[in-house]
Amino acid sequence: MRARHDDLLVVAILSATSAVGILLLPGGVPRFCCAAVLLLCAPGYALTAALFPPGSVTGAVRLLSCVLLAIATLATGSVLVHATTVPLGRPAWTTLALAVTAAACVVAFRRRGAHGTVSFAGLARPRVRRLDAVLLVLALVAASAGVAISRTPLPAKEALGYTQLWMLPGVAGPGDEVVIGIRSAEKRSQAYRLELVAGEDRRVIQARIVLAPGRQYQQRLRLPDAPALSPEPADGTILTAELYRLDRVGDPYRRVTIKVASR
Amino acid sequence: MTAVAPSGASDAAEIAGLRSPRRMHPAALLVFLATLGYLICVVANALSRATLAPSPLIFWAGLGLIVVPIAFRLTGSEASVRERLFLVCLLGLGLYAVKLARDPFAFTYSDELVHAYNAVAIDRHEALYSSNPILPATPYYPGLEGATAALMKTGGLSVFSAGVLVVGAARLLIMIALFVLFDRISGPRVAGIAAAVYTANANYLYFDAQFSYESLALPVFIAVLACVVLWRRSRRRALWVPIVMGTATVVVTHHLSAIALAVTLTVLCLTPFALRRRTTSANPWPFALLAVLMVATWTVFVGNAVIDYLAPVFEGAAEGVKTTIRGDTPPRALFKPVQTGASTIEVPLLERILSLAAVPVLAALVALGLRQVWRRRLGPVELLLALAALAYFGTLGLRLSPTAWEVGNRASGFLFVGVGFAVGCSRLEHWAPRRVPHAGRVLLTGSIALALLGGVVAGWPAGLRLSQPLVIEAQGGRIESESLAMGNWLAEWLPERRFAAPVGDARWALVNGRATVFTGSHPDIQDTLFIPAMAPWMREILRDNNIRYVITDRRFRGAVPARSPYFSLRPPFEAEEILIEPYAVKKFEDQGGVRVFDSGHIVIFDREPGL
């Protein structure tokens, strides 16, 4: 009877395909699947097949070896690749995993020779009883529901919201332009008023900004447009941006400052 | 006591069951119950995230539904070897899912954020050994982060998704390794029970499931031990490969686990001499020598920063034990209330009682088990595990010392392997009085459940056991907590700058903000941020470390890593937020800094404006 190594063939084909997928696909679930196959499954399986011919160890030992060697390949592989000064990018990882898998498959093939046949043709189809199938489907539904609920942000009645305010030099530099940003992390839509202050002078930049939770507002401000700064802002002038909530009176809700540099 | 059914009989029973069209396979039911338990835990966490204050019973019910049916099945004689292995894996992954139910959006534990930063650095720079300003020793043990970065780079995953997969693989590995180890020594029934008992160790549910280097190193450690035990009996040369690769993995992943592996293998070499008995099993001295050489080489040439990192810990622990025994230092309070910065959370009385009750129950089972092991001829591996079980109870005393507590806590993950083995050998499941034939199984299952409860109570503070609001929904929008949002803001507006920050907020700046962050006491950033006056030494620290930006957080919780990630909650749901002195923040502005960012509690100053 001709020896068959269906498992090695499947591993080799899947590994090669996954390697191509990792290098060429832009991202998303398909590339993740390729990475999972090539990095998490193939090296461990192939190395185990090379070390332990069929029937030589129990299923538990084989499974232990698969998982251990998969993890070890990645963990020690990173150190070995780094030592060669090759960057740890996609080509390096793909090459490492593919090389280990390919070499192990070749070794497994040679060690098995004509005696270690692994053929899928003779495998019996697993029998799943109806009740078992129902339970497993229900389990899948429960697990999926669990993941969905976990990953869904929920309203938190007692959580305290807040608002971010920032002011940074624009691209042109702190003497020419500033960027003022507001982001609302309040629990409901909020109305604000934005003012800019330089010394005694005060100017309303925006009389009313309404932001829903999670929304952001940005404004770029050329400094000649700022109060009391024409014709030229003095070096070291401190500009203050003050944010007021329209549903409150009194002190600014948020305050940021910037020092105008010489131009 | 009834005799154990030989495994052949259980396989025959399984085949007979398979032939019957009406019977349900127990494993299918257990899968369903485990996922139902997971769903209940998810609901408990969701209610907690929504600040609806769920009863702790919901969480315990979910946990019980995962553990109890599986443990009960494992105590029986009907399950085949394959089914026992499957159930052990199901148990391990089910409990890991409970951890993920607590933290579904991002890593939140203090150490997780530090290691996530290392993984992100490897992914970005495509090289190892970048610096880490918070835990400088960690980049020199890149096993976990290297494997994670591999998945990030090839799979296009975030550090969180990749990290979950890597730790998930490690959780699967530890259960398989425990099963193989115990199966080789005492057979599959003991193996299943012992592996289930191991999940009751205090660190199993949360601490050793976090994205941290021990979470990978410990499972590989046990896997190497299992392979060595296999090798001792069979002398198969093929086993050299997983042993050597596994040892190398432990060495490049976690310093303490590497030392523990070297010590364990050395003790295993010496135990035959202690037993003064000839044995046909091979002595694993080559692997012990290899482990010692690898640990020494790595420490000398790569990870020498770990010496400065670990030495104070052990010195402090030793000193702490002495001062506690002498009475100079009061003992550490068990079930200490957790100071969250805004509230103080007590451990419920019932949980304390049950947690304390778990200790004598475990001790009794260990004693029973060790008696059984002694009777049937103690071998070197059994002696090693017995010593580990006894040492575990010794380390419980370390928990009473404020400075040695951490050492005792970390050791439990390793030593509990011995406890699991001993309990697995107790044969309590064989006690079957005529009127109550399952009494022994019920008692053993109940003991495992009690031990698990005790472990969870001891291992994680009550107020932090369930998920807290980190990302919430508001009017259809998604908003993040103030600390998390600050980190994201840094990534967008001030990436890769140098900051001083409180201990908790520093981690978000580090990971999300890709910043170089200084925090803690060395240098003394903590006092620089908290003391309401600007002293010359503070300016010196900021200048000497080239720190341009200072992140201040008026909330005390900013310095509490366990609480800083989450939203502040309004009174009376949570106590009024404790705020630090206003001038501790204002002093940076008075010294010429500008406020570039203000989110209420968190204000970021630029000390060198205009540049």
Image (cartoon, rainbow, N blue to C red):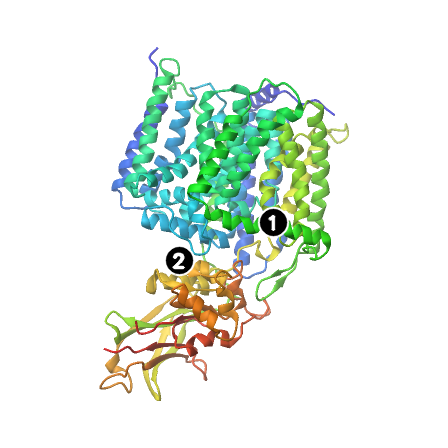
> Tag 1: residue type?
Gly
Q: Where is residue B444? Give x, y as percent.
A: 68, 35
Q: Which residue is drawn at 46% across and 56% down?
A: B134
Is the residue marked by circle 1 packed among few (<14), some (14-19), or many (20+) residues within 10 Å?
A: some
- Compared across the picture, whether A45 is left or right of B262 comes to left
Q: Name the residue under label 1.
A: B459
- Closer-to-camera residue (A86/A65): A86
- Closer-to-camera residue (B301/B66): B301
Q: Is mark 1 on a helix, strand or loop?
A: helix
> Tag 2: residue type?
Asn
Question: Distance from label 2 to label 1 (Cα)?
Answer: 28 Å
Q: Where is residue B287? Give x, y as percent.
A: 50, 28
Q: Where is residue B269? Give x, y as percent.
A: 57, 27
Subunit ID for the residue under disc 2:
B
Residue B512: which disc?
2
- Closer-to-camera residue (A146/B161): B161
Residue found at the far top of this picture: A1
